[in-house]
Structures are given as C-alpha cells and as structure tokens.
Image (cartoon, rainbow, N blue to C red):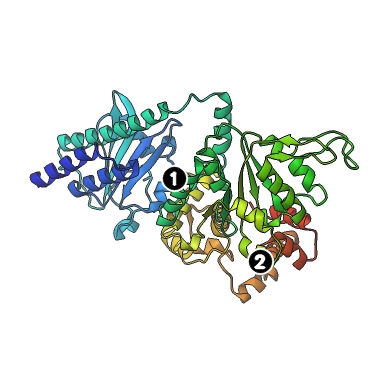
Amino acid sequence: MHQHMSQVLLDIALNLTSNQNSDAQYQHLIDGIDQVFPCDASALFIFDQDGFLVPVAVKGLANSVLGRRFFPKAHPRLEAIMQSKQPVRFDANCPLPDPFSGVLLSEEAELDVHDCLGRSLHVDGQLVGLLTLDSMTVGAFDAIESVTIETFAALAAATLRNIGQIKALKAQNKKQKHVTETLIQQARSKEGELVGLSPQINQLRSNIATVAKSDYAVLITGETGVGKELVAHSVHAQSHRSTKPMIYVNCAALPEGLAESELFGHVKGAFTGANHSRAGKFELADGGTIFLDELGELPLLLQAKLLRVIQQGELQRVGSDKHLLVNVRIIAATNRNLEQEVAAGQFRADLYHRLNVFPISVPPLRKREGDIPVLSGYLLEKVRNQFNIPNLHLHPKALAQLERQPWPGNVRELEHTLTRSALRAIQQNETIIQPRHFDSDLRPTDAQSASKYFPQQSAGLRSLVEEYQRDLIVHAYEKSEQTWSKTAEFLQMDRGNLYRMAKKLKVVG
C-alpha cells in the first residue's frame, strides 16, 4: 500500500509540471486520490471570487455536478469544511444535509447512509478550494492518518495554485482592461455559456478559437435551439474586437417596410414617420461586430445591400445620397440549408460565398454524446438560483428519460422542459423532479395530445389555447423547413406578428 501511495504521490507531483490543460490536471488529481483513499465518490472545488464553490473534477458523482455552483451558506457541510483548517469528518448519523444527495453513482446511494470527509485547501493562508470524499462504508475514514490527508491536501492546494498562477500570467499578457471592456464583459456574462463535455462540443470550442482571432465573416449553421447565438458571442468575445460592441439583429423579426432603415438607418423625412435622422445597426456596430441571426429570412433586396457593405465597407441611409464607411465584422447564423436556398433562387449565391468564409456547424443535442447530464445540472442551477431552492434535484429515472428524447428543439427545448418540470415539482412542495413532473412535455402520443386540449378536469381556457397555439407553431415550423417566412405562409399570417407571438409563447428564446 505504501509503495502504491508513493507512486500516486509522484504522479500527482509530476502532474504539477505537465502541459495538460487545467481540466485534465484537476481530474488527474482526483483519480489519484480515488486510488489511495477508501472512497466511493470524491470532488475537487475551487473557491471563486464571487464566493461560490465550483466543482472542477469529480469521481463517483453524476456529471451534472460539474454544471453547478455551490453557495456555501446553502450547504452547511461545505461551509463547515471551508471554515476549518483541519480535516472535517461527518459520520453516517450527521443531520446536516449532504450537498451530493441524489447524485452519487453508487448503487447503494439510495440508502443515503454514508461517511464524508472534507478538507479546505489554502495557499499562503488564503482559501483556494475544497476536497470532499464520500464512502458508503460507515467509519471508512476513521483509520486514515492525518499526515496522509495533509499530504494530499498540500498537493491539491499546490495544483490549484500552479494552475491559478499560469492563468494569471496569461492574463497579464493581455492589454489593460478599461471601463468599456469591463461593462461589455458584464453584459456578455448574462448571455450564458457553452456547456458540455462531449467530443462534439469540444470540437466546436476548437473551431471558435481558430476563427475568432481573424476578421473573417463567420457563418454559423445548426438547428433551432442549438445555441448559435452563444457561439456568436463566444467568437466575438475571443476576437480583437471584444472591447467593442456586438450588435444583434434578428432578420426574422425585422418589421416589413422598415427593415432597410433598421439595418442602414435613415435621414429625416425619408418616409412617413421619419421625424428624425437615425443610425442603423451597421453604424452602431462600427469597429465591432454585427450578428445577423436568422440570416436566411433576409429579403433578396436587402441581401444585395448587405453584399455592398461587405464588399466595399460602405452603406447609404434610406433617403440619403451620401456614402458612409463602416468597419464591421459580420457573424451570421441560420438554420436553413443556404446551398439549397441558392439553388432555388431564394438566396444570393455571391452573398452566400462572401459569408461562408469560415462556416461553423453547431451540433444538435441528440448528437452530443453524454451532454444531457451536465446540461441538465447547469440549467437546473439557474432554476435553483431563481427560486432559491438549493436542494432541487433530478431523479435518475427522470434524467434517463431526458437522455432518450430526440430533442428537435435542442438545448432551448431541454431548458423549457426542465423549467416547467421544476415548477410543477415546486408547486407540489417536492424537491426531486420525477418523470411524472414532465407531464406531456416529452413527445406525447396522439391520445395524450388530445387529453391535453380536451382535459377531463377543470383547466383555464386561456392556458389551454396558448398550449395549443404553441404546439401548432412548433408543428408548422417543422413542416416549413424551420423558416419563419414559410411558417407564416403556412399559418396565413404576417411573419413579424407570428415571430412576436412565438416569442411571447416562449417557442423561441
């Protein structure tokens, strides 16, 4: 055993000087601890600047944990470990709630009887993280010598310090961040992040990093709800234009008759109601980035004007004969197959080739191997924070159901489903989301659909009608090649009105 532990310690020490990325180094440390200590689960946390404990590597716990942040005051055991500079043991009879209840992978986890051990990690007297160990065996940690725990705690703290110092050195090489950049960063942090551990999402991150530093136009393709807007924000955030604005334009929601003015601006008196001169979205984005979402919905007339901006860097406000020069990087997104649109004469071939310099394809959720658990953890954390329910969890059977779904609406559909199921659980004073809380969200049968619209018990007419409208719009959208203009034709209504209705009903984000 002693020789085995010496080898593990040596491996962890060598890990400190390796060129692996930080995630791999964190996991290497946890794997080593798992080999030496009699534990069924372990976790390494970093204490971040916002006062949260963020899991960076786990063993024997569901991957959904990695999508969460733990606020110490909501988790008494973690707070107790954090406040002690000595190892803290919690025996099987400890009344304090376990932060990992419901996410242990051990077959015996349902017994909810186990021993826990935690150690705070300090560098120069400053808290940098925590290490937690769980065992399904009562008294498993009683015989462990303090020196063994302290040795691993010191190595864990050194690993965190080493990675932190490398990150700090990289940060120092960047130019000084001024006030504008700080404000933009704060705004961007509200947009969300790309969450996932799958090879597909890692490849996507790699593609983003490759193109971000250039000024090339980027065309982001993918089904509805896959996160194309998050990809656009990530490209802009990693570019040399990150201190400048990224202006968002939803081409599907541009009001008919005013679309040109929205994009390129107008002068006073250019049309009825133009009482003041106004800058368009391209002028606002000068020096930065413009993100053209739902690009395939842009009318052919505006496609020609957009091509001129790309080719010559100049535009004209509506009603003006003056040419304005702009320096804008274009990121566009579409769920249409633009090659087919070009062949059908519905999209300009020259514009397509100008924008398709560096295409980025965002994978659908059903092709992202193993990402449902970590995404579910991340999305549920938003619900926990919103409703202040730190102990809300997903039952393993409910998670298994989510993993079997095709998710035609992708991450957006998953988020809406989880939010609705969480609300149902909360309304019933429950903290574990069970399969029954999904109600009819998960691919209902025809019989279930009928019972939803013709309920057997009392239900509000307005909510039933809205549910029907929502399903009808989704059905028409999928029947109409996932384009809003064709969906509007299918439902015989104005495209702008349809899009606003879809947004109100939360069909789109």
Which residue is found at the position 9% from the left and 44% from the top?
2
What percent of the width, then of the height, locates residue 86?
25, 31
Near-viewer residue (147 or 23): 23
Give the label on residue 343, or none: 2
Q: Dot 1 lies on which element?
A: loop
Residue highlighted by disc 1: 68
Give the label on residue 244, or none: none
What percent of the width, then of the height, locates residue 458?
70, 65
Where residue 408 sits, quadrant-wise, is: bottom right
Q: Residues within 10 Å of mark 1 (few under 14, many from 20)?
A: many
Near-viewer residue (39 or 19): 19
What percent of the width, then of the height, locates residue 83?
33, 29
Question: Looking at the picture, does residue 80 appear above or below residue 504?
Answer: above
Direction from residue 36 to residue 408 in the image, left or right: right
Near-viewer residue (185 or 419): 185
Q: Dot 2 lies on which element?
A: helix
Direction from residue 216 to residue 470 in the image, left or right: right
